[in-house]
Structure formats: structure tokens, C-alpha cells
Image (cartoon, coloured by chain):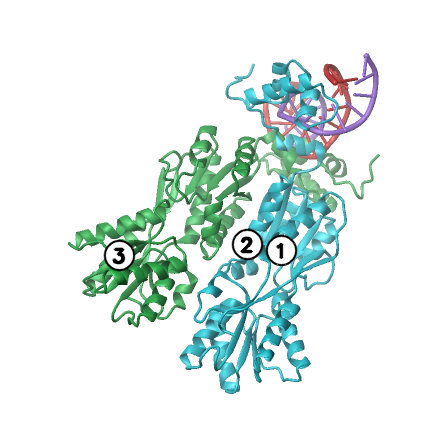
Chain colours: A cyan, B green, C purple, D red
DNA sequence: TTGTATGCGTTATCAC
DNA sequence: GTGATAACGCATACAA
């Protein structure tokens, strides 16, 4: 006989206390239809009294659901995130939705190649009902692997590897177009860009947006590539000024790089926005505190997280979802442009 | 008869293919001692051929281990993290250690009170082998709750609620002392501080460190309280200058607030470090890029994460650990002081 | 060294 | 409406 005070109660324990069968207790726990109110009450009391909590392993073993969703974060992404509210923003969006659906979040940090195998194995074991992919770099193998394994999965950002799984992304091109048009409306004549890395969707699409908008205005492109860090913004801006001193505006593909660019402009004694207008992208927290405050393209980070969770939950429950959801971006006017 | 091509293989499937019993396969999988090399090989081949992966639910049901650790992040913490590499740094440290131990990370975002109950239930269900608490705000109820439930748990940062569970923290006081002594060695006469919120350990301990070091030098304290945001640094610095124009140095309890303080100083035309020396705390990425670059107290974030994971793994495996581990901080000299 | 048998705590399919 | 009872997939004590 086991010590009832220390051993965790099971369905059986509850059933005995309530004077019913395990099956009935299970029905009450899972909110099944046909249970007499009186019985239901008795069971609820017993559950309360014993502090009973269902064993997820046992439940999952038979139900074949785990009630948990994995978020896979490749190392390059983790690094990118580290100086920006992007990661935590997405995370909180995801958390909110999973919470509402009573699902758990399992975080998989894909750092090393060894670890990659571990993750694949983990996912193959169906330890989670679905997967959210923070696939920020180019040749990410996860999307196709997951598709092949038949695991419900959605990606954050259009996977470069092709349309094998549904994804959520923001309207990079539209956002950049709005930015450039704003600059044009101010009468800016020489609009350059500091682009992001060209092996990341955000880098690629924002540059494409710039090229398109500038071409539409009959202007020439003027491009420097950065890597989304503040430092790269500083040096890219310097190169830009060297190449083309007549620059009167620059669209920078991230706020962090824009901070760096502002720094260079300050050093070079170019007034912002009088001499050179600057527009960033992200609407990071810091964009409010730069000098001058940064005009930037806001992307709905929290909403992206929520959407990711919503879609993967749909997939996990057998529904199908749109192959792509593109969330709107918005130009936020401050003082730098 | 089930379709062998779609159904996931089980121990049974592997056993048949390898021509042995389930028990033997289980032994091979779990690396038990006494198994004939030949048999082991046959099993490995079968596993490989079938792409067999153990079912975690079944395994956990019988073994009573889940091979996963939860990280509980209260909402205030999540918000704090959002503009700083702190969260991702801790996360990567934890990830690295859990990875090495082949454990999974379950992220629990404790946002709403409703959600709090959900989390407690989840933890009580022993769905994880241990818990890491990112308990950054004052009256966090989790430490005592977990202690009462007997769940292996460690906290990041000394829990204000008292010593109910082991914790990992950094040497706030020592770090601040080094900072103040550095300022004293420069001959600074009027050293103020911008402290953090006084319901967070980091806020409390850093202020205590400042008071101690200043008192030891026979000087008076001069304190303004911020909330760790850039904006609060800006306004606190302004108040400080109003109250005591003769200030020639300030220790700021976070780099983010220090950025704000630098901004105010720049506006007030005070040269840094000539007129006013500034020392921050954290060594955030941005500390390298401020103008001038920020002298600051570095805390070993990654190491903290690793230590958290190590300790909780020890607890989970039945060992006991020190009630507190304090990691060293280090003064990083740049140009602001 | 290997195989047999049992139980882990649920859910679900039956009868009643 | 409720109660037996059979899986679910694995680890392990015990036998052989």
C-alpha cells in the first residue's frame, strides 16, 4: 500500500474517493457530455481535495497529442535577436496564443550541427504537436525536413528554400516603398540604402523594395550592404558618403544599423534631417531615443508571433492554412525624415 | 495489421526485425551493459533501417523522468529583457548545458494571473524534471510555491522572498564597488548614482553597493531612482544635475539608463568624461557604441545561464547544491570614465 | 546474456 | 449514464 500523502494521486485515487469508476472521473476531467451533475460534483470535490493533476505522459501516450508546440531557433537567428526586441516580441505573441489554447512552448535552440540532429530526432518522435520555425538564414534545412516528416509546421519569414511550408511574414516591400515615397515627397534627389545581409529574407526583400521604389521614380540605386548590426551601419554610411557625397537621404534596413548611420552622419557634421534624411526599419525601442528620433517602418512583431501560433495550432488540429500570411507594415514619422 | 510504412515503429517493430526481444532492444537503446556486441549491432541496424525513435511519453510514463526543464519567465522580467541581450544570453547559456545533457527546455511565460495558476498546475503535474526561475521582481510567489511542491528549482538572481530555493547571482556589490573606486582613483569628488527599481534584486543590490562604497570613502550619497529604461536614465540625470550641479561622476545601474544619462549630459553640454564621468552596468552590446564608449561593469550572462542549468540538473538527479552561487563581475574600461 | 511478464496512468470501446 | 477492460509504448524485476 502506498503512502497516500506523498504519492501523487491518480485517476484511481480520485475514483475511489468519489465512489465512482476511473472512466467516470476521466469523463469529468475532460468535460464529456453525459455525466450526472451530482456525480460530476462529487468528482470535482475529490479532485480538489486530492490536488489531482492528470499525468501528461499517460495522457499523451494514449491520446497521441502532447499539447505542446516547439519553437526552433537557429543560432544565427538567436544572435540577430540578441540586440533587439524582435525575439522577445515574437515570443510573447506566441506565448499569448498558446496560453489561450492551453498548449506549452518547447524552445529548441539549434546551435551546433550535432544539436541539429538531436532536434530532428526530437521532432520526429512527435514530442510536439507542431513546430514554429524562426528560420532567419538562407539555407535552413528545417523547412524541407519537417515537410518530409509530415510534422505540422509554420515558418517565421518566407523560407528561402522554397514554399514547402506555410509562413508568416511582414510586408517588407510595401514598407520600404512607403519609406522611399515619403523621401521622394520631401524632394530628396539622391536616395541611398544600407541593406541587410543578402542571405536573409529581411535583407533581400527590403533591398528589393528599395530598388523597386527608386527605379519607379526614375532614380539610380546606391547600395551598401550591412549585417544588421550597429557597427555595420556606421561603416556602411561612411562608405556611402565617400562614394557619393551628394546623398540627401538614406533608407536603412534596420533601426540598429540606422543608429550606426546616424552616428557617422553626426561625425561628418551632416545635419539630420536637413542635409540627409534617414529612415530605418523595425521601430525598435531605441528608435524613439536616437538623436534625432528615428522615422522608421514598423512591423507588427507581436501580431506575427500570435499569427504563427494560430496557424500552427490550426495545422496541428488537422485544418489547412494559407501558404502565406503577409502582415502590413507602417511608416512611423519622427524627426529623422 | 497496421501499415508498416506509415505507422511509427515501436520497440516491438525493431525487435522483430532484429530477431530479438523488446527487452533487448530497450537495453541497447539505453546503453545497458551486458549486451553481446553482435546483438547490439543487429539492433542498431534495425533501428537505423526503421528510423526508430523512442516514444517520450511512454518512456516518461514508466521512468518518471521527462528529460525536460522548465524556464519560468514572469511578465515583468520579459519586459525588462526586451531591450537588452540579457534574456537571450541567459537562454543560450541554459540551452548549451541542457543540450549537453540531452534535456529539453520548456518555456513558461507567466503573464497573467490566470496563467499563473496554469503554470503551477503544469509544474505540479511533474511534466518537467526541474525548474529555472527568472524571478526578477519583488514578491514573486513561485520560489516558495515550488519549494512547497518539492520540485527541483533554482532561481536566477537572489529571490527577495527569502532563501527558500538555491539561486545563482552575480556580484552586484563587488562590481559597483570596483566602479566607484575607479571613480575615486580619478579624483572624482561628487559621485552620484542612478539606481534601478527597488523591487528588483539588481536594483537593490547595486544601490547598496554604491552606498557602501561611497560611505567608505567618507562621501555623501546622491541618489535618483530609475526603472532600467533609457528614458528613465535621461530624466534621472536631469534631476541629478538640477539638484547638484557640481556632480563630476555618476554610476548608473544599467547600460540602458546610462545611454539616457549620456544623452542628457550631451544636451547640457557637459563633457564626458572630462566634466562628468559615467559608469554603467551590464556591458550590453550598445555600451561599445555610445558616445563616448561606456565604461561599465560586465556581468557573466552566458555563464549565469550555464550555471542555472547545471544546478537544476544536479537537483533533478537527486544531488544537492550550494544555496547560492555568486559569479564575479568585472569593470570594463572604455572612454566614459 | 537474453527473454517473459508486469505495470506506469490515461483514454476509448464496449457492454450494461 | 456508468463501469469494466483493452490498448498506448516503454523499462525493468525476475526467470531462464
Q: Quadrant of the N terminus of chain B?
A: top right
Query: Closest to the observer: A63 or B117?
Result: B117
Q: Are marks 3 and 2 on the same chain?
A: no
Helix, strand or loop at disc 3? helix
Pointer 2 with pointer 1, Cβ within 8 A: yes
Q: Which mark is residue B336?
A: none
Seen at 44% across and 44% down, the residue is B308
Q: Is residue A120 visible?
A: no
**Spot occupied by residue A102 in the image (x, y as percentages of width and height):** 62, 39
* Neighbours of disc 2 within 10 Å: few (<14), some (14-19), many (20+): many
Closer to us: mark 1 or mark 3? 1
C-alpha separation, residue under disc 3 versus residue under disc 2 = 35 Å
Please rate how many residues cluster around mark 1, counting C-alpha atoms within 10 Å: few if below 14, some from 14 to 19, many from 20: many
Picture coordinates of residue B207, whole percent (x, y)? 29, 50
Classify mark 1: helix, strand or loop: helix
Q: Which circle marks residue A89 in the picture?
A: 2
Q: Estimate how packed mark 3 is, as few (under 14), some (14 to 19) or many (20 or more) residues with alpha carbons within 10 Å.
A: some
Q: Is residue B192 visible?
A: yes
Amino acid at each position: 500500500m502506498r503512502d497516500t500523502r506523498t504519492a501523487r494521486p491518480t485517476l484511481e485515487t480520485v475514483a475511489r474517493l468519489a465512489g465512482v469508476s476511473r472512466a467516470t472521473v476521466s469523463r469529468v476531467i475532460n468535460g464529456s457530455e453525459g455525466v450526472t451533475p451530482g456525480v460530476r460534483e462529487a468528482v470535482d470535490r475529490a479532485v480538489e481535495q486530492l490536488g489531482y493533476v492528470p499525468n501528461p505522459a499517460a495522457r499523451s501516450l494514449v491520446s497521441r497529442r502532447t499539447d505542446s508546440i516547439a519553437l526552433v531557433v537557429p543560432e544565427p537567428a538567436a544572435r540577430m535577436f540578441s540586440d533587439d526586441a524582435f525575439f522577445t516580441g515574437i515570443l510573447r505573441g506566441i506565448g499569448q496564443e498558446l496560453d489561450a489554447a492551453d498548449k506549452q512552448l518547447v524552445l529548441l535552440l539549434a546551435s551546433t550541427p550535432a544539436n541539429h540532429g538531436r532536434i530532428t530526432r526530437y521532432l520526429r518522435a512527435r514530442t510536439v504537436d507542431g513546430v514554429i520555425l524562426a528560420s532567419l538564414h538562407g539555407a535552413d534545412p528545417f523547412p524541407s525536413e519537417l515537410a518530409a516528416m509530415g510534422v505540422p509546421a509554420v515558418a517565421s519569414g518566407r523560407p528561402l528554400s522554397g514554399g514547402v511550408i506555410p509562413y508568416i511574414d511582414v510586408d517588407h516591400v510595401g514598407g520600404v516603398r512607403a519609406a522611399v515615397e515619403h523621401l521622394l515627397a520631401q524632394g530628396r534627389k539622391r536616395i541611398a540604402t544600407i541593406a541587410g545581409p543578402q542571405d536573409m529574407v529581411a535583407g533581400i526583400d527590403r533591398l528589393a523594395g528599395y530598388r523597386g521604389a527608386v527605379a519607379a521614380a526614375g532614380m539610380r540605386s546606391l547600395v551598401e550592404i550591412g549585417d544588421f548590426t550597429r557597427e555595420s551601419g556606421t561603416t556602411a554610411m561612411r562608405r556611402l558618403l565617400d562614394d557619393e557625397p551628394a546623398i540627401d537621404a538614406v533608407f536603412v534596413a534596420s533601426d540598429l544599423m540606422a543608429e550606426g548611420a546616424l552616428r557617422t552622419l553626426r561625425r561628418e557634421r551632416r545635419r539630420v534631417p536637413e542635409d540627409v534624411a534617414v529612415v530605418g526599419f523595425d521601430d525598435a525601442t531605441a528608435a524613439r531615443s536616437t538623436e534625432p528620433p528615428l522615422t522608421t517602418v514598423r512591423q507588427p512583431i507581436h501580431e506575427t508571433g500570435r499569427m504563427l501560433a494560430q496557424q500552427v495550432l490550426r495545422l496541428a488540429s488537422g485544418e489547412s492554412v494559407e501558404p502565406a500570411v503577409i502582415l502590413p507594415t507602417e511608416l512611423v514619422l519622427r524627426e529623422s525624415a
